[in-house]
Amino acid sequence: MVNLCEIKYSTAPYALHKEEYLKIQARVQAFVDSTKWRGGVLLTLMSPYGVAQSGYGGSVAAEVTLDDLFV
């Protein structure tokens, strides 16, 4: 299992929309193809205020916020 991190800046919880979700999925597939990775890939999103749980926000396996970094 590997965590593939996507880092986004926003001034509120980050809302993941379809277009961005599809771009991230393409990056995940490019990672798998180029590394020949056979294990699972978990999408981890790093954002100052986390991920908004609407739209495609549920596709994020883990999130890291500023509070997580400065505890």
Image: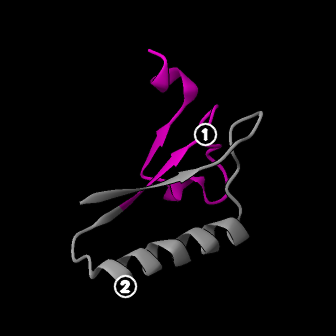
* Residue 7 falls inside the magenta stretch: no
Mark 1: give few (<14), some (14-19) or many (20+) Cα within 10 Å. many
Q: Amino acid at mark 1?
A: Ser
Which circle's residue, 2 or 1, is located before the other in the chain? 2
Q: List the residue tagged with mark 1.
A: 47
Q: Residue furthest top?
A: 71
Mark 2: give few (<14), some (14-19) or many (20+) Cα within 10 Å. few
Q: CA distance from mark 2 to mark 1?
A: 26 Å
* Residue 63 falls inside the magenta stretch: yes
Q: Pinpoint residue 10: horizontal percent, then vertical percent.
A: 74, 40
Q: Pinpoint residue 15: horizontal percent, then vertical percent.
A: 71, 49
Q: Which residues are magenta?
A: 42-71
Residue at the image point whose x is 42% and y is 52% from the top: 61
Image quadrant in which you'd find residue 20: bottom right
The residue lying toward the viewer, choosing from 43 and 35, is 35
Horizontal side, residue 13 vs residue 71: left or right? right
Residue at the image point whose x is 62% and y is 74% from the top: 22
2 or 1: mark nearer the eye: 2
Q: List the residue tagged with mark 2.
A: 33
Q: Pinpoint residue 57: horizontal percent, then vertical percent.
A: 59, 53
Location of the C terminus by quadrant is top left
Image quadrant in which you'd find residue 23: bottom right
Location of the N terminus by quadrant is bottom left
Q: Amino acid at mark 2?
A: Asp
- What colour scheme was applied to this rendering of the protein? one colour
Horizontal side, residue 19 vs residue 3: left or right? right
